[in-house]
Image: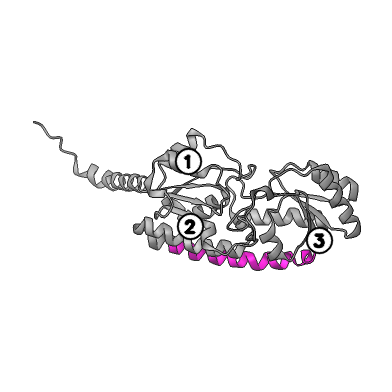
Amino acid sequence: MMFHQWPDNWMKRYLPGVLLLLLCSNTVQAQLNVFTCEPEWAALTSALGGNAVKVYSATTAQQDPHYIQARPSLIARVRRADLLVCTGAELEVGWLPLLLRKSGNGNIQPNQPGHFMAADQVSLLEKPAVLDRSLGDIHAAGNPHIHLDPYRIQQIATALAATLGEIDPTNSHYYQENLRSFTHEWRQAIARWEKQTLVLRGKRIVVSHNSWIYLEQWLGLERVAVLEAKPGIAPSSRHLGKVLAQLKQSPADIILVANYQNDKSARWLSQKTGLPVVGLPFSVADKETLIQWFDRLFNQLLSRDS
């Protein structure tokens, strides 16, 4: 058998490059596959995981995360995931359990290291005193729209970085470094947002769906009416008439709707009252960071309120 002898100059010139390529290849293969349910958690995971993670979001900012189909493509994604990052608190109850069951992926099932629910890391507002499904789409654990509070996002980021490190201990230090960088930038952004939105404190709002409680509490907004008579159920003309009568007695300043929501009822109420309808991005757009999303949200809210 003949063995080819490579010239010494070839070895000196090209071997380091070959080794670097092999190292890069191994790094790519070592990436964690992270399946997120909502784009806000995809953005947060990307910020904390950097090059060590490959992140996929099951939904976009233009979709209602309550109502998603458990498509075969999503099942395939979940099957390959090393880590699942979702909101929890029953936000995805209509589709996530089916995905988990169909995936056969034992690593990301409830109570496993790869199963991360953001709502489990923070306290929730609006826990119902009575659990009665006839009252609408009520979440037993409390309101799940926690991503609209940057302080809760910070708590979730700390817990998520620790989880990434537990699943991938080789890069644990890297995740903690990214957490420190994220925390520094995030705290600066919070200080800027709180100064920027002082003019909103005390504003009276009407909401299409009770999605904004965490933003309301943070910014000092006062919710005076909800267009839905029951959570998740489209308002009847009778209920809208009651809201209109209420607002004539106790006026509001703006009507808030999420961009993915049907704004027909909000537009009707706007015509009757003259209140501006403010459509806000409810989550992060593609290739947008969490800070960029909050900046865009406040720019739209402040421009319509002025």
Three-letter code, disc 3: Arg
Horizontal side of residue 213 vs 57, given as left or right: right
Colour scheme of the rendered structure: one colour
Residue at position x 34%, y 58% in the image? 170
The CA distance from mark 2 to mark 3 is 36 Å
Q: Position of residue 27 (x, y in %)?
A: 35, 49
Identify the mark at residue 48; answer none if there is no mark: 2
Point out the frontmost of discs 3 and 1. 1
Q: Say whether marks 3 and 1 touch (CB < 8 Å).
A: no
Residue at position x 26%, y 45% in the image? 15
10 Å neighbourhood of mark 3: few (<14), some, or many (≥20)?
some
Residue at position x 59%, y 49% in the image? 288
| Among numbered discs 2 and 3, the one appearing first in the sequence | 2
Q: Is residue 80 magenta?
A: no
Q: 25 or 95, which lies in front? A: 95
Three-letter code, disc 1: Leu
Where's the C terminus, which quadrant?
A: bottom right
User: In the image as oriented, which residue stretches furthest toward the top?
Assistant: 1
Q: Position of residue 224 (x, y in %)?
A: 80, 59
Where's the N terminus, which quadrant?
A: top left
What are the residue bounds of the magenta stretch?
Answer: 176-204
Q: Position of residue 266 (x, y in %)?
A: 80, 46
Three-letter code, disc 2: Leu
**Res 297 quadrant in image:** bottom right
Q: Is residue 189 magenta?
A: yes
The CA distance from mark 3 to mark 1 is 40 Å
Identify the mark at residue 99; answer none if there is no mark: 1
For mark 3, give the secondary structure: strand
User: What secondary structure prevails in the magenta region?
Assistant: helix
The CA distance from mark 2 to mark 1 is 25 Å
**Res 185 quadrant in image:** bottom right
